[in-house]
Image (cartoon, rainbow, N blue to C red):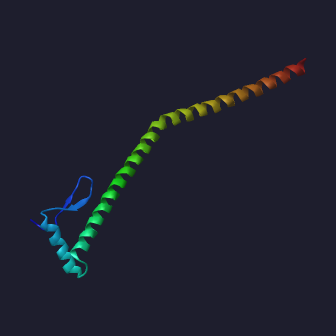
Amino acid sequence: TRQGTLRAHASGSARITGTSSEPSAMIQKLVEHTGSGTLSDWYKRIVTAEEELDKNVKEKEHLHQLMNNILAAIEQQGPVLKAQSDDYKRALESQQALADQVRQLDAENERLREQN
């Protein structure tokens, strides 16, 4: 097997997998390549990075769920808001028609007063 293979989890995170000697071999190669740090230092860095990755993945999933909830609430309110908007437009049209009738009746009333 290849040492240090990465396996993508369903959650989208990647982890070092394989036999127990593979991570140590990977760390040893990293130390040899960079020339600094002990094996335990590198192991701590990897563990910390994996923990941070897990935390970020969980936070991303939580935020994604919140966004889905907000979207669902907006979609649920959409028809209600449309109906309210339509009612408001009808009320404005009705108010305008009634105002026109009042003006016509005032004019008719004034004309009838002048005739008497």
Q: Nearer the viewer, residue 18 or 11?
A: 18
Q: Residue furthest bottom?
A: 35
Place of residue 105 in the rendered image (x, y in percent of width and height, measured from the top left)? 78, 23
Toward the top, the furthest residue is 116
Residue furthest toward the left? 1
Residue 26 picture quarter? bottom left
The residue depicted at 32 percent of the width and 56 percent of the height is 57
Q: Nearer the viewer, residue 3 or 82?
A: 3
The image shows residue 84, relative to residue 61, as above or below, that is above
Does residue 72 appear to the left or right of 26 in the view shown? right
Q: Is residue 66 left or right of residue 99?
A: left
In the orientation shown, which residue stands out farthest toward the front?
Answer: 40
Tell me where residue 46 sits by quadrant: bottom left
Work out whether 91 lies above or below 63: above
Residue 51 versus residue 35 in the image, above or below: above
The image position of residue 65, as x and y in percent, is 38, 47
Question: Going by the image, does 23 lie left or right of 52?
Answer: left
Residue in the image at 58% along x and 31% along y: 87
Q: Name the side, left or right, on which 34 lies relative to 107.
A: left
- Rendered residue at 19%/72% (across/down): 27
Quarter of the picture containing the N terminus is: bottom left
Q: Nearer the viewer, residue 67 or 91?
A: 67
Where is 56 relative to 67, above or below? Answer: below
